[in-house]
Amino acid sequence: MSVSRIKLLPEGPEFSRLVLGFWRLVDPPALNPQQTLTLIETSLEEGITTFDEADIYGNYASEAMFGRALALQPALREKMEIITKCGIKLVSEERPDHLLKHYDTSREHIIGSAENSLKVMQTDRIDLLLIHRPDPLMDPDEIAEAFVRLKDQGKVLHFGVSNFTVRQFELLQSRLSFPLVTNQIEVSLLHQEPFLNGMLDYCLQHKIIPMAWSPFAGGKLFENKDTQQHVRLHNALQAVSNRHHQASVDQLALAWLYKHPARLIPIIGTNRPDRIKSAAQAESIQLSRQEWFELWTAARGQEVP
Ligand SMILES: NC(=O)c1ccc[n+]([C@@H]2O[C@H](COP(=O)([O-])OP(=O)(O)OC[C@H]3O[C@@H](n4cnc5c(N)ncnc54)[C@H](OP(=O)(O)O)[C@@H]3O)[C@@H](O)[C@H]2O)c1
C-alpha cells in the first residue's frame, strides 16, 4: 500500500501523508549523496514525496547534502515537495557572525535564508517555507512583507509556521492575504501537549492540517528503559500489536497519530531505507477508539477522568 496524499488547502498544496525529515541526515556517520539519494528514492517508491529540511539542520549542512543528492537525479525534483525553515541562528563556524544562538524573523533574514536554501538545495522553488520557532521580537508585518516578496518572485509557493501557539498563529495570519498552510509541532505518544493546549482544536476549527515532528519522540519510543512509563507503554503497544498482525512500534505510533481527526502529517527522521518502508505501512492499521485510549492511558499513567 502506497502512502496516501493530502491537500493542505482546497487549492493545494498536496503533500504525502507521511514526510521524511532530514534533521539527522548529516549526523555522524553522515550519509553521502548516493546514500541520501537512496533514502529519497525509497521514500518516493513508498509514496513519500514530501521532504522536510531547515537551514540549520546538520549545522547548516543538511540542505546542501540533500541538494547534492538531488543533483544526481535532477528529474526527481518534479516528483517531490520540499519544505524548509528559517528564523533560528546557530553559533557555528559556518556563520562566524552569530555570537549566540538566537531567533531572527526580520524581512532581511527570511529572504536571505530562503534564497540560500534555494541555492544549496539546487532547486528553483521551495514548496513550503516555515518560520521555525516563534520569535519574541517577531514583527508580523515584516514577516508578511518577506513572504509576499518571496511568493511574488515564485521562490516560495506556500508558507507556514512551526512551534507556534494558537495566538501566535492568529497574529501572523491576521497580516497575510493568503493562508498559512500548517503549524509543524511536536506530537507523539510521549508528547501529548497539543492534544491538551488547544492547538489541535484550533487546527480542526480552521481546517488547518498540522504536521507532527518527532512522532517516535526522536527514537525514545524504542529505548529499552525500565521507567514505569516505558514499561507501561511497551506492554500496551505489545497488546495492541498482538491484535494487529504484530504491527511494529513505529507503525503503531504513526497509526495512533493518524487516528486524530485533525489529520496530522507525521514527519519521521530515520536514515534507514528499511525503516522508511516499515513506516509507510502504518496507514493500513486502523486502531479502535478503545485501543487509542489504551495507548494514551499507558503513556500518561492514569485513566481519563
Ligand atoms: N519544526 C521543528 O521544530 C522540528 C524539530 C525537530 C524535528 N523536526 C522534523 O521532524 C523530523 C523527524 O524528527 P526526529 O528525527 O526526531 O523523528 P523521529 O522519527 O521521532 O525519531 C528519529 C529517530 O528515531 C530512530 N528510529 C526511527 N525508526 C526507528 C525504529 N523503527 N527503531 C529504532 N529507532 C528508530 C532514528 O534512528 P535511525 O536513523 O537509526 O533509524 C532516529 O534517531 C526531523 O528530521 C525534522 O525534519 C522539526
Image (cartoon, rainbow, N blue to C red):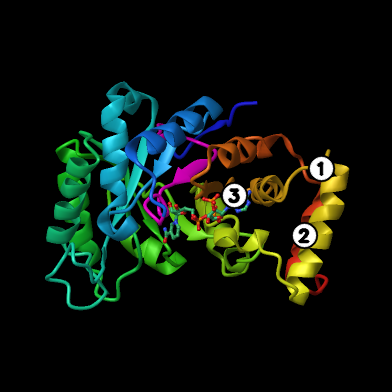
Apparent side of residue 221 relative to residue 45 in the rendered image (left or right)? right
Q: Which of the marked residues, 1 or 3, is nearer the chain's N terminus?
A: 1
How far apart are the alpha carbons under marks 1 and 3? 27 Å
Q: Residue 29 in the image: state x and y as whole percent.
A: 42, 53
Q: Residue at x 42, y 54 (%)?
A: 24
Apparent side of residue 187 relative to residue 107 in the rendered image (left or right)? right
Question: Which amino acid type corresponds to the residue marked 2 in the rendered image?
Answer: Leu
Q: In the figure, 268 relative to 284: above or below? A: below
| Crowding at mark 2 (Cα within 10 Å: few <14, some 14-19, many 20+) | many
Q: Secondary structure at mark 1?
A: loop
Residue named by callout 2? 295
Q: Residue at x 38, y 67 (%)?
A: 168
Q: Which of the marked residues, 3 or 2, is nearer the chain's N terminus?
A: 3
Q: Mark 1 or mark 3: which is in front?
A: 1
Residue 81 or residue 75, whichever sits in front: 75
Residue named by callout 3? 262
Q: Is mark 1 within 8 Å of ligand 1?
A: no
Residue 138 is inside the magenta segment: no
Question: Which amino acid type corresponds to the residue marked 3 in the rendered image?
Answer: Ala
